[in-house]
Image: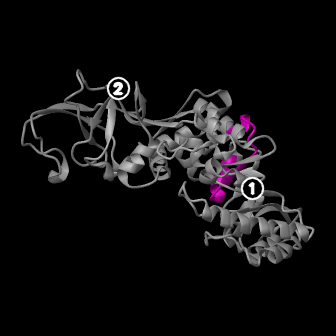
Amino acid sequence: MHKTWVEIDAESLRHNIRSIRAAIGNGRGIVLIVKSDAYGHGAQSVGKIASEEGVDRFAVAAVKEGIELREADITGEILLLHPPLDFETDTCIQAGLSPTVSSVANARLISDRADFGSVGVHVEINTGINRLGLDWQAAASEVQQIASLPHIDIRGVFTHFRGIDPSDSSSIDQQLQRFEKVVQAVRDAGIDPGLVHAASSHALSRFAQSHLGAVRPGMIIYAGLDPKSPITESTNGAASHMQSMTGVMSVYSHVLHCRRVEAGEWIHYGETFQAPRPMDVAVVPIGYGMGYSRHFSNNADMLIHGRRAPIVGVVGMDMTVVDVATIPDVAVGDRVTIMGRDGSKHISAFELAERSGTIPYEVVCRLGNGLPRVLVNANESAARAQSAQVAVTESAHR
C-alpha cells in the first residue's frame, strides 16, 4: 500500500491500441513510442501488453531503455530514436536495437562497429523540424551512400513533423511532400526504403494522408484525445474509432489530516492564500517532489467523494492543502483522486496541463516517474513485467 500512487489501467491501454489499429486500417504498422518509461506508464509492462495486442515495433530514446525492453522479453523491433554516440554504439548493436541514422558519418560508425551480419537502421529525413536527420534536399543521394555501406540494412525511412496546431495543415502538407519526394527518389535509385513512417500522435489523429506504412503513436495511446481539440471525419473515418480512447493513468492519494482554519488565517507557505471565512481543509500527501507541479498552487482541484476540492495555498514538496468546505464528512484516510475519475467528475492530464501552462506529456511523465506505480486490470504476463520493476520503483520512492 502507498499513501500516494499511480494506477495504470491495462484494459484502457488495450482499448486505445485497438482503437488506433482500427483507425489506421489493415496493412499499416504501429511503432509504439515507449521512451521515458512509456511516458511514466512503465515501459516493460506497456511493452508486454502491446505485444499481446500484436504490436511488434517499439521506439525508445536511450539505449538503456531498449535493453530494459529486451530484459522483459520484448522480441519485436526496437527503434532507437537517437543516433547512438561512439561510446554506446557497441551496446546498441549487441542489444539488437535498430538505431536511427541521422548522417552518413553516423552510418559509417555503425558499419565499422558491426563485426558480423548486418545492423537494421532507420534513416531519418529532416523535412522541416531541423533537429535530427538528413536534410531532405540531399537526402536521396546520402541514403544511397548509406545503403552501400557493409553491415547496414535499411529497415525504415522516416521523418518527424514540427506542427502541433490541429487547425494548421500547411506545415504537415509541406513536410509530407518533401518526404514523399525523397522516398520516391530512393526507390527510383533501386533502394528499398523499408518501413516508411511519419505520423506521430498529432498527425495520426488529424491527417490521414500522413499514415503511410506505419504510425508512431505516443501520447495519444496513453491519454487519448484532447477534449478541447476534437477531430472530425476528415481523417477518413478515423474519428469514430479514436473518440472513445481514454486516459490510461490515474493518480490517487489519501487525506492525511483535516483541520478547521479560522477567517484571516494563512494557509501553507508564503502567505499566498488567506482564509476569507472559517473553512475546513484537508492535507493531501503529494507535492512537487513527487512530480505534482508547484504551478498548481491555488490553481487546480482534486476530487474527494466525487466533488472538486480546490487547492488552497502553495503546493509543497510533499504536502498540498485543499478546501473541503463544501464536501461533507471528509475524514483521514479518504481516497483523493488527483488525476482520473471519481463518480461523474474527471480530472484529465489535459486539464492539469492547461492549469499549469504546460503539455500533458510533461504531466504524465512527471507523475508516472515520480510516484509508485500499480498496474490494474492486467493479465499474468503483464503483471509479471510490472512486478519486475516494483522493487526498483519502491526503493526509489522510500
The amino acid sitting under disc 2 is Gly
Quadrant of the image containing the C terminus: top left
Q: Is residue 124 visible?
A: no
**For the residues bearing labels 1 and 2, Cβ distance under 8 angstroms:** no
Q: Is residue 151 left or right of residue 369?
A: right
Dot 1 or dot 2: first in sequence order is 1
Name which residue lies at 61% across and 59% down: 169
Give the residue pinned by disc 2. 306
Above or below: residue 73 compared with residue 329: below
Above or below: residue 73 compared with residue 170: above
The amino acid sitting under disc 1 is Ala
* Residue 95: assigned label: 1
Secondary structure under tag 1 reads: loop
Task: Give the extent of the magenta segment.
Answer: 49-69
Give the Cα separation between the discs numbered 1 and 2.
47 Å
Q: Is residue 343 left or right of residue 77?
A: left
Q: Is residue 137 visible?
A: yes
Q: Nearer the viewer, mark 1 or mark 2?
A: 2
Name which residue lies at 77% across and 74% down: 139
Could you say which quadrant of the image residue 237 lies in? top right
Could you say which is closer to the camera, residue 119 or residue 250? Answer: 250
Could you say which quadrant of the image residue 23 lies in? top right
- Picture coordinates of residue 127 (x, y %)? 68, 70
Q: Is residue 77 left or right of residue 285?
A: right
- Picture coordinates of residue 394 (x, y %)? 47, 40
Residue farthest toward the top in the current orientation of the protein: 329
Quadrant of the image containing the N terminus: top left
